Amino acid sequence: MATVTRRGRANLIALPILIVVGVIWIYPFLWTVSAAFKTQAGLFSGGANLIPDQLDFSNFERAWVNAGFDRYLLNTVIYSVSSTLIELVKAALCGYVLARYEFPGRVLLHRMIVATLFVPVASIIIPQFVLVEQLGLLNTRAGVILAMSGSAGALYVLLFTGFFSSVPSDLFDAAKMDGAGFLRTFRLVLPLAKPIIAVVVIFQFVSNWNEFNIPLVFTLAQPDLQNLAVGMLSFKGEHAVDWTGFAAGMTISFAPMLVVFLIFQKYFVNGLAGAIKG
Amino acid sequence: MYAHRRAVTAVVMLLLTALLATACGSGSGGGGGDGKVTLRIWDFSMEQVDFHKKVAEKYNQENPNVTIEWRAITQDEYKKTLPLAFQSRQAPDIFYWSESNMARQSLLLEQGWIAPLNGGEPLPQDVVSRWPAGSFIEGINTAEGKAYSFPFTENLFWGPGYMFMNNQVFQQAGLDPANPPKTWSELEATCAKIVAATEAECIAAPKKGNQFQRLWHALTGGTMSNLFFDYKNGRFSLDDPKMLETFAFVQKLEKSGYLTPGSIDQNFARQQFAANGAAIYMDGTWMPSVWATQGFTSDKYSVAAHPNPDAGPTGALVREPSQNVYWVSSQSAAPDAAWKFMEWMTRPDGFFVQEYYKNGFGTLAFADSKKLVTDPALKKIMEIAETPGFRANIPLPILKCPDIAKSKAYSEAASQRPDAEYEAMLQALADNSPLQPLAAGVVATRQKAFEDKLAAEQASGLKVSKDCYTFPDWDYRTDYGLDKYTG
Amino acid sequence: MVAPIDQVAPTTPPVAPSQRRGRGARPRIRARSGPSGVGASENRERARGLDRLWIVLFLAPFLLLYLGFTLWPLIATVYYSFFDWSGMGPIDDYVGGENYGSVLTDDLFWLAVGNTLLFAVATTVIKLPLSLIAAIVLTRTWLRGKRIFRTMFFAPLIIPVAMAGLIFTYLLNPSNGALNSILRDLGIVERSFDIFANRWSAMLAIVLVSVWQIFGQYMIYWMAALQNVPDEIYEAADLDGATEWQKLTRITLPMIRPVAVVILLLALVNAMHVFGLVVTLTGGGPGTSTYVMSYYIYQEAFATVPFDYGYASAAALLFSVLAFILVTGQGFFVRRAQRVRDEYGV
């Protein structure tokens, strides 16, 4: 009984604060969504107002056609899903080995991963371009996916390394006692890494979804292979920006990512705890 | 053991399928064996995408074996991606390039990006005559007698320096846009009334990076020249007393609260003007078509020439042959088809010209604008530009010293931190400090790089010198005619 | 222990294992057997037999991509930095250290370095504690509506950076932006002000917008870290009658410290790559006063044709080295301070 009232009290204090902060927090977000329904003039004179001057769905129509949602959505999904997968697999495998095993060059590799985090990404796109060209993968989806999943990821290796080195060694000892080999052990502990997997999936998916430079540069001769982020450019004219079209495009493009987040966030909640208790 | 193998297989398959399943859609070739040709054209005119689609369709109707893929990439990205396209040998057949004004052709030749028009043969006379005499200039769009490009938009009407006035805001303030402010003091007086009588700002002024040029070109076009290089004295000129005087006036406007506050960008400024949030906006010939796409039609605003100093104008806006923007790529598999298309596109009464004017995109060098323009705002713009002393042909160093075509001195000096002039001005504006010390710094750096490189080039045998860039007999206001170089 | 900057040589036996790799590693054991860290032997084992093959197989995907898309481009960048090269055509104009010389003597480079570091430190100092608080609150079992609140704080992250910048230029603009119109309506300010008119307020705006956008990411990092703390410890503490505050300071914070080091590193490193917000919010202005490193590099590399790619490469490398030294140096001092504190039992 005492705990119930204590919880109620805590909620009573926390909820109002969270609601106020949260609404301010997503205000720019709401503003964008409402801008998607406004007319250009309404957007401009609206100030802080969130209520559209009229319900103007033409922005969405324009966004669908101009940003090439019908054409580019598939590409965007393919790019995001496959490079997130590759990213996840390579980071998990490498992180596991780095954390669990001693081998020549381990420290060197670890140090290099950390050191290369500091290189500004913008400065190395030309050599990356040369590489994809040499592989004969320019203007293919494979080239885009490779480049997208190749250039990021050192960071996630660090996360996995960190996680796997914090798994109690009892667990590994027990696995060994049971006669589990390398792979069995890996498969045993991998599910424990759900929080990290969720982190990687969410961030990599979001950043792949919005990736702009790579799809643009690596599909120069094949505009059909571009993604939504590049398509969104069509709202930015030489002399003017179609703000409301932009906002509508953004609004359509948000939706899939909110879904991804809602699905994966539950893994944080029931991630590790249960597994370790066992 | 089987479990192991299954897991490995799963992982490997995952990687492979991810890669292979998507490896489809590899590049399609340009020219085919059956006489079919695909011409790829790139530019950054995003608002002309629909128009270009129509042009491509029409051309394909008339020439069934030629397909045109006309593609627009936004300007910032374009500058980055086109070089990459050339590097990877996937450059388009025809491309748009408008960087580095007078040095453009020599730069493109040096990079090996361009091929001559018409296979290097002289252009047919009936084609050449589509342009005013003197449009093909050795070193500008012609090299060793071969034409490489042609003036696209003409350069008298087309350019910066016009003052747009919002009718509604003017009327609210009890002002008549038909009677615009002609001098700086009149501009101040107008602004005072507008600020007092309306909710709107007076002048919508973009202050983000080089977009400050929108206002700057218009005002400095009345005092000296809207270039940061002074061809009279052969030096970079931001610290020139006339420039400083113009800037001091801008600073005065800012202090009086006559400029829109904040470092807004040009899109914002234009929209603010169109939404009756500002009375005045200064910019170029392209504005009527920009506003038309936003539903702000020419009956809602008026156009006038930029205001001049009270003592009368002492300078003019620049007119230079810098409108050579479409080039045939050296990597094109079908340069003949590319030229044929260009010939079709530049027919003075052809489909391209008709539609271009119908859309109100601007004024073309190979068409009779006076006959074709219908938009009242654009008509007014043409009237203004024809006033003597509004725009003047500037001297061309390349005609004085042909070796300038090989010189990099000017382009290197001007491209080192290309926006330094604007950055200095915006700094001074934000800090409300005098421009002079900052300007002197910018000029000193540029001038040193310029003269050092010239000296080095001279030492290596090029016939170039600061003298090539100095035209003491020029007065900023009058055309520097082609006849003046024969001395 | 997550050891990206720990970099303990594998052969050195850990002096104080519980501080070095024990903490996050064996919370349960520690909780039972006290802080001495019983059984804190080296977690890693040497590979034997077939395992070696597996190790190679496991490393291969990462190594291949890393070689191709990070290491080789890096080596190429080092190479380019010794040439006057435009980014295309033959690389034949060897200039030795000239690019480095001119970068080091360029005032704007140092201004950009200063701004970048200022930005990195400021955002980190603001976002890490706040996102930790948010993460702790949003993982409380008693809280209602967790999902909604998490999604709210996460939402800004799914907007592309450049777009976020555009939205805020609109919201913050002095003519008709939301901020100014609200402040005016409330009577807090009389005349609208331009936050981007002055170097310091412009930097502050960039910092705050950046915190707003990236906040959800760090909140999630912290939430993942908090999951590492087993419930039993809290349950044990409950039995001992510990207050929430005691649980926080005595259990939660010490236990997530190893992960905190990584999160700190990530925060600093990511902040140093700030680019899109600067482009859209200030364009480096007023004047050049909010130039940051990647903007400087971008301007040098791509602003004018012919590109100055060799010069930009030199600038990028110099900055990477500088950032590396500063961040790892900071890590070194933090660890030393911690070690000293632990030794004296403070």
Image (spheres, coloured by chain):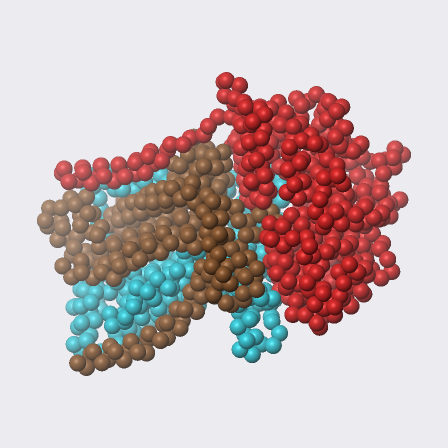
Chain colours: A brown, B red, C cyan
The image quadrant of residue C107 is: bottom right
Q: Residue at x 75, y 60 (%)?
A: B177
Quarter occupied by the N terminus of chain B? top left
Percent across and percent down for residue C131 are: 37, 66
Percent across and percent down for residue C287 are: 64, 59
Q: Foreground residue, C156 or A188?
A: C156
Residue C8 shows in the view: no
Q: Residue at x 17, y 81 (%)?
A: A1
Percent across and percent down for residue A215 are: 45, 42
Q: Foreground residue, C341 or B134?
A: B134
Quarter occupied by the C terminus of chain B? top right
The image quadrant of residue B280 is: bottom right
- How many marks overall? 0
Percent across and percent down for residue B24 are: 38, 32
- Give the side of residue C32 with respect to residue A135, left or right: left
Residue B204 shows in the view: yes
Q: Residue at x 14, y 37 (%)?
A: B2
Q: Residue at x 84, y 43 (%)?
A: B479
Q: Foreground residue, A24 or C289?
A: A24
Q: Foreground residue, C60 or B131?
A: B131
- Give the side of residue A214 with respect to residue B264, left or right: left
Outermost residue to the left:
A178
